[in-house]
Image (tube, rainbow, N blue to C red):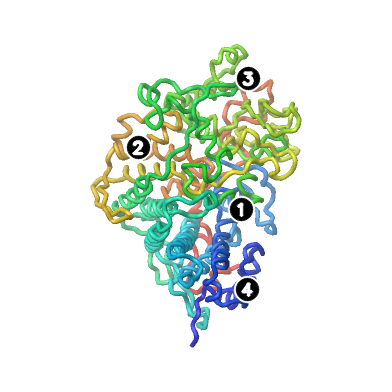
Amino acid sequence: MQRKTLYIALMLVLGTNLISSCKKDYLKSDQYFKDRITLEKTFKSKLYSEKWLAHVFEEFKGENADVASKGLTPHCFADDMYYGDRDKDYDPSKNELSYNMFKMGLYTETDKQGTWTQSYRGIRNASTFIHNIYMNTEMSEAEIVDYRGQARFARAYLYWLLLRKYGPIPILPDEGLDYTDSYEELAIARNTYDECAEFISNELLTAAKEMEALGMRRGQDGSARPSVGAALAARAKVLLYAASPLANGNNSGYAARLVDKQMKRLLSADYKEEKWAKAAAAARDVIELGVYRLYTAPFQETGDDATVRPPQDHNFSDKSWPAGWADIDPAKSYAEVFNGTLTASGNPELIFTRGNNQPNEGIDQMVIHQLPRSATGWNTHGLTQKLVDAYYMNDGTDVPGKDKEIGRGNGSNRVSGFVTQENYDNKTYRPLRPGVSLQYANREPRFYASVAYSGSFWTLLNETKEENRNKQIFYYSADPRGNGFNSANGYWLRTGFGVKKFVHPSDTYEGGVGSRIIPKAEPAIRYADVLLMYAEALNELSGSYTIPSWRGASYSISRDIAEMQKGIHPVRIRGGVPDYSANIYGNKNELRKTLKRERFIELMGEGQRYYDLRRWMDAPVEEALPVYGCNVLMNVEERDLFYQPVAIWTLKTTFADKMWFWPISHTELKRNKNLTQNPGWTYND
C-alpha cells in the first residue's frame, strides 16, 4: 500500500468542506502544489518552499487573529470593552454576533468556527513542510534548519490557538496518517489539557533551538516572522495557562463533565505547584535573552496636550529609565507602542506580530469604530466603568468611588465638579481641558493614553477641514456634533467612555475605509505580557524548584520578591505609577489580585482579558456583573447626572458553564466519531 500523509491528501480526499469554507486567498499556493508538481520538486525549490510556508502563515489571520475587531473574533471584548453597533437581530448569513448574543452565550455550534478549520489545515501543511524541507537544494543548512523552526512554531502556535479557544483538542500524529484508511479509522480522540500543553511547549522549545541557527533577530523584512523569542514567549504563555486554576487542580462540576469517549478527564483535578515554576522559568528564558525591552519616549513638556510629569514618589520619580521615569513621558511611551508611531521592526517590545493584521475587521477597523462620529468614525467601541475605575490615581491610590456601584467600594464617593477655564489656564489638571469631569483628574498616564472620556481631546490631524482638527469631544445626549446618544442610529457610546488606545494623532476615517488610518502592527505577544507572566507565576509558589532553562542550564525558582519586581517594576515605571507597598508584596493573595488588575490595565484591548478570566476561573463573577457607565441620556445642561454611573440597559451580561470553552462544530463531531463536545453544547443540528 502506498502511504502518503494526511497533510497532503487532505485536499484530495477529505478536504471538500475545508476548501469550500475558506477564501481563495488562502489557497493561492495550490497552483503550485495540487496535482502539478511533486513534493520533491516543491521542496527542492527555495521559491516554492517559501510559498508553502507563507501559505501556512496565512492561517494566522482571519478568526485566528489575536487582536481584531468583532467581525473576526469577539474575544477582544470581555468585561473591559464592548461594541454597540451590532446589537440588532442575529444574521447567520453574515456570521456576525451581536454583543449581547456573545455576552449571553447565545452563539451556536456554527459560529466563529474558522479557528478550527484554519488551524488544522495549517497544522497539516506545516507538518508536510517540517518533514520535507530537508530536500531543499537552494538553501544553506542553516536556512533549512531555520525554516523548519518557523514551520514548527507555526504548527505549535496553531495548536495553541485551538487549545485556548476550544480547550483540549486532538494532537495529530507527527508522522502523518494513511489516507487509505477509512475516516472512522482516522478519527482521533481529544488529548488532555496537560498533554496538549506539554506537546506545544516541547515543540516551541525545539522551534526556538532550530531558529537559533540564524540568530536571535529578524531583519526589517522579517519582522512578522517568528523568532527565537517568539517561540520562547509563546511557550511561557502555554505553560502559564497550564498552571492556572482552569487546568490545574480543577475540581468543578464542569471539569468532571469534560471527558473523552472513554470518560477520561481532560482537565486535571490534581494541583501541581511545579507547573507555576515551569511557567516562571519559561518567562525567564525570554527575559534572559536580553533582546527585548519596553519602549519609552523622552519627556517633552510642550504643547497644550502635553502630559504632566507623574508626582514625586521618592523612588521612581528620582531616577532615569529603566530605574525610574524621570526622563521619560509615560503616557506617550505607552500610547506609541500601539498607535502606529513605531514600525513592527522598530518596536523593541513587540515579540510576535502578524504585521498590520488584515484589512476588513483588523486593527484599522477597531480604530474606525473608536473614532468619534464628528470625525466620520463609527463611535461604537467603548469601555466599561469597571475598567475606567481600575486605572490608578497618579499617586498609586484608588480613584474615589472605585467600584462603588458593583458592591466593591471602600466607602468613598466619586468626586464632583468640572475643570474650569481658570484651572486650565493655570495648568492645574493637565491634560484635562475645560468642562471635563474631575473624576478624570490626576489619573495615571496609561489612563490618558487609553480612555476617551467625555471631553477628551482629539487631534485628528488628517482631517481635511481645519475646523475638524484639534477639538474636544463630549458624549452628552443631543450633542449637535452627533457624538452622544442618538436613538435614531447606532453611532453612540453606550457607557459614555470611548477607546483611545491604538489611535494615532493623525487617524481619521475621512476619505474611506482605512484610507486615513496609520498602519499598526498587531501586538500578538509583547514583552510587558512576559514580564507580568513572570511575576504572576513566581507569586504562586510556596516551595523552591530547580527548572532547566531552554539552553540546558538550570534556574532556582521560588517566590522571591526581588525576582517578581523584575517583572513588575518595568511595567509600573514605564506606566508612570508608583511601586506596590511592602504589604502587597508580602501577601500572596493581595499580590495576586493586584497583578490581575495590572494585566486588566496594561493589556486592555489586546485579546487577553477574555482568556485571563477563564484561566483564573474568575469569569463566573466578572463576566456576569452588570455593565456600568455614564448616564448617556443626559444632555449638557444635566451634566452632573451624566457622570453618576448607571447600569447600562443595552449591554447584557451573564456567564454559564458552557462558556468556559467555545463549542466544537457539529460538522467536526460528525466527521470524527472519537471527538467529544464541550459540556453544555449539542452534538446534532
Q: Nearer the viewer, mark 2 or mark 1?
A: 1
Few, some or many residues within 10 Å of mark 2 (<14, 14–19, 20+)? many
Please tell me whether mark 1 sits on a helix, a strand or a loop: loop
**Alpha-carbon distance for marks 2 and 3?**
37 Å
Say whether disc 3 or disc 4 marks the residue closer to the N-terminus. Answer: 4
Say whether disc 3 or disc 1 marks the residue closer to the N-terminus. Answer: 1
Q: In the figure, 188 relative to 603: above or below?
A: below
> Which residue position holds label 2?
591
> Which residue position holds label 1?
72
x, y percent for residue 676: 48, 67
Please tell me whether mark 3 sits on a helix, a strand or a loop: loop
Q: Residue at x 66, y 41 (%)?
A: 517
> Which residue position holds label 3?
435
**Residue 634 appears in which quarter of the rendering?**
top right
> Which residue position holds label 4?
16
Q: Amino acid at mark 1?
A: Leu
Say whether disc 4 or disc 2 marks the residue closer to the N-terminus. Answer: 4
**In contact (CB < 8 Å): disc 3 and disc 4:** no
x, y percent for residue 489: 74, 39
Please tell me whether mark 2 sits on a helix, a strand or a loop: helix
Few, some or many residues within 10 Å of mark 1 (<14, 14–19, 20+)? many
Say whether disc 2 or disc 1 marks the residue closer to the N-terminus. Answer: 1
Q: Amino acid at mark 4?
A: Thr
Q: In the figure, 408 relative to 539: above or below?
A: above
Camera-side residue of 206 and 19? 206
**In contact (CB < 8 Å): disc 2 and disc 3:** no
**Alpha-carbon distance for marks 3 and 4?**
60 Å
Say whether disc 2 or disc 3 marks the residue closer to the N-terminus. Answer: 3
